[in-house]
Image (cartoon, coloured by chain):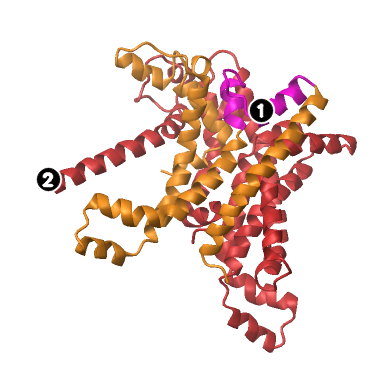
Amino acid sequence: MNNKLRGTLISILTWVLVLLFFFPVFWMFINGFKPESLASSVNPKIFFTPVTDGYRLAMDRGMAGYLQNSLTAAVTATVISVVLAIPAAYALSIRRVKNVEGSLSFFISTRFMPLAAVVLPLFMILKTIGLLDNIYMLAIVYGAVNLPVTVWMMRSFLLEVPFEIIEASRVDGAGLFREIVRIVLPLVMPGIAAAALISFIFAWNEYFLSLLLTSSAARTTPPFLASFVDGRGQFLAVLSAAATIAALPVIIAGWVAQKQLVRGLSMGAIK
Amino acid sequence: MITPFLVMPAAAALIWKFSMFDTNIGMVNWLFRTLGLDSVSWSTDHPLASVVIVLTWQFTPFMMLILLAGLQGQSKESLEAAQVDGAGPWRTFTWITLPHLRMYIEIGVLLGSVIILQVFDPIAILTKGTGGTKTLAYLLYERAFIGLDVGQAAAYGVVTVVLTIIVATVALKTLFKVFMAGGSR
């Protein structure tokens, strides 16, 4: 009996914590559907007639363009980093190069480097060659930033491919290219998905580089959202609506692929 | 539960700033008023606390996911064996589960600190670097792009690189120990 009571208490506590953590997101979602006067009222209202004013206003501010930029940057960066990571990971796992550990350290040490340290030279270079405010340039930068993590992840997946299969394909006379495309890649599809997901999430959510390397034409969603900080008057409903739109794709992707996400976040350390 | 970690950090910081921490319309202050306390202007009066709260909110799910993966990988046999040997729940936890989780805790702390050290978004949005919340990233941004003192900012950049090399050397040692223990070939 005592045990049962304790069990109930623990579940209640867990649920309270979960709700506490989820509340800001829930509140953002709710506020997006309120008329501005209600969203900014001093006493919070739970019951109201939902309106889509917030979403319409957010779109009026040209949000679609920023979303499109974000999408372009995120997709291009993902493609770049995954396509480059596969051969790199292959050389670090199946057909080993010399000094694997050294190469891995080198790769990951670039990820330990705060972006702040590289942003200044990057800014100068891009300014000189006239590629500031270019969405594809931003995508290349994102791809490069993601690359170490994707290489590490892909390697951890490639290590799991049974060597017998690869050997059998070699005996059957498959060349290097065929071996990778026909044998290895289909086996590590979940790994590629995980790497792509992480890469996409990073590029979609990235604020710092986008703020500094773009100004108008190539601006992505996060700096657009941050521009609400300087807004005057009541803007909580618009802000909530815009934030909901911006956050939703990643939230959904994360929910669907939670298991891959864990492995990706730990760079392949956790299976 | 993992949602806070997935929400765009810039969006999260904005939502916290305006719909949670705001003096008039923030939910935290509504709660305070309901409980009969004075409202607090979080992001101006307690900037460091605000940043810590938001970052904690963001990264708890991340740590939880990693530890959860560790717990799921624990074998039932060793738990049962501990029970047979007469260990209570507390002893089982401290002597069996915690040592098993050690590797996962190390990964979490390591990756978490690497990411959080570089944090920029909540600082730029919540406090603009006031009240002792200036991280190296924000300091450099401020010098170069607001103060327009590129030389000084570049110097900060060099300092950052040196510090990173020191931290990364230590971190990499741990990382390799952890990774190689976790199934290398």
Please give the label number shown on residue A2.
2
Residue type for callout 2:
Asn
Q: Which residues are magenta?
A: B120-148
Of all chains in the rendering, the one displayed in orange is B
The chain under label 2 reads A
Q: Quadrant of residue A8?
A: top left
The picture places residue A15, in percent across and down from the top left corner, at 30, 40
- Pinpoint the chain carrying mark 1: B
Q: Within 10 Å of the Cα at label 1, are there few (<14), some (14-19), or many (20+) other Cα atoms?
A: many
Q: Nearer the viewer, residue B14 or A47?
A: B14
Residue at x 72% of width, y 28% of height: B140
Magenta-drawn stretch contains A66: no
Going 64% across and 46% down the picture, which residue do you hit?
A: B168
* Secondary element type, mark 1: helix
Please name the color used to draw chain A. Answer: red
B104 or B24, which lies in front?
B104
Type of amino acid under label 1? Tyr
The answer to whether A8 appears left or right of B20 in the picture is left
Q: How many numbered badges does the structure rendering display?
A: 2
C-alpha separation, residue under disc 1 versus residue under disc 2: 52 Å
Q: Residue at x 63, y 33 (%)?
A: A222
Q: Are marks 1 and 2 on the same chain?
A: no
Which dot marks residue B59? none
Q: Position of residue B6 (x, y in %)?
A: 51, 42
Q: Using the rendered image of the protein, determine whether residue B163 is visible from the camera's viewpoint.
A: yes
Residue position marked by numbered label 1 in the rendering = B138
Left or right: A32, with A153 as reference point:
left
- A112, above or below B135, in the image: below
Residue B7 locus on image (x, y percent): 52, 38
